[in-house]
Image: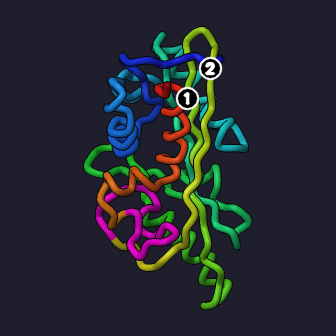
Amino acid sequence: MTRRLGSGKLVIATHNAGKLKEISALLAPHGVSCISAGSLGLPEPAETGTTFVQNALIKARAAAEASGMPALADDSGLAVDVLDGRPGVYTADWAERQWFEGQAGRDWYMAMGKVEGLLSEKGPGVDRSATFHCALALAWPDGEQAVYEGTAPGSLTWPPRGEMGFGYDPVFVPHGREQTFAEIAPEEKHAISHRADAFAKLVGEQFGG
C-alpha cells in the first residue's frame, strides 16, 4: 500500500518561485502547506539523470534528507517531436542562467528562440507538435518514495504570446485551444497542464478515499 502524505508541511524541491506558486495552489485544498527548498537554503543537487523520473527522484531525496521533512520534486520539460524529443530533460539548460536586478534567473526567451531556430531550419511546413512532460517524486526522510507522471500534448507557436505562466508557456498551445499556456488564466491552466495531469494521479492516490 502506498504511503499517505497527509496534511502538514511539505518541502517543494525547487528554487523557482513560479513553480512553487503553482504547486502550492494545487495542494492547498488538501491542507498541505508548501515551503521551498530555496527558502530553507538547501543546495540544488546535480541533476544527473537521463529521464524526468530520475531527476525528480534526485531532487526529492536530497530535499527530504536535508530538511528531515517529506519533499516533493517536479521535473518537467518540453519534448518537440521533430527535434527527437529535445530539449527534454535539458529543457531548463536551454535557458542560460542570467542575472536580473541582482538575482539569478534563466533567460527563457533565449530558450524559446533556440527551439524556434531549430524548427525554422526545417522549413515553413515543419511539424510543430510538442508535449510537456511532468514527473512528480515524493520522498520521505526514511527513504520511502512514490512517482507520478503526466503529459500535456500541443503544438508550438511563434512569436511568444501572453504574460502569465513561465518557462516555455508563451509558445505552447495545448491541444483543443487557441491560446498559449501564458494566455490562459492560472486556474484554467492548472486543470489541463502536464503538472495537473501528474497531480491528479498524486492526489487520487495520496488524498483519495
Report x, y in % for residue 65.
55, 14
Residue drawn at x 29%, y 59% is 185
Residue drawn at x 33%, y 40% is 21
Identify the amino acid type marked 1: Glu
Residue drawn at x 36%, y 50% is 99
> Which mark, residue 23?
none
Mark 1 residue crowding within 10 angstroms, few (<14) / some (14–19) / many (20+): some
Q: Mark 2 touching mark 1, by CB under 8 A?
A: yes
Report x, y in % for residue 25.
33, 39
Secondary structure state at the residue bearing disc 2: loop
- The stretch drawn in magenta includes residue 172: yes
- The stretch drawn in magenta includes residue 60: no
Q: Is residue 160 above or below residue 46?
A: below
- Front one among 109 and 83: 83
Mark 2 vs mark 1, CA separation in Å: 8 Å
Q: Which residue is mark 1?
A: 205
Say which quarter of the image contains residue 109: bottom left
Q: Is residue 30 above or below residue 1?
A: below
Report x, y in % for residue 158.
46, 79
Q: Is residue 140 above or below residue 152?
A: above
- Front one among 119 and 199: 199
Can see residue 69? yes
Considering only order in the chain, which callout, 1 or 2, is on the residue closer to the N terminus? 2
Mark 2 residue crowding within 10 angstroms, few (<14) / some (14–19) / many (20+): few
- Residue at the extreme bottom of the image, as rendered: 124
> Which mark, residue 2?
2
- Front one among 42 and 63: 63
- Residue at the extreme left of the image, as rendered: 101
Q: Which residues are magenta?
A: 162-181
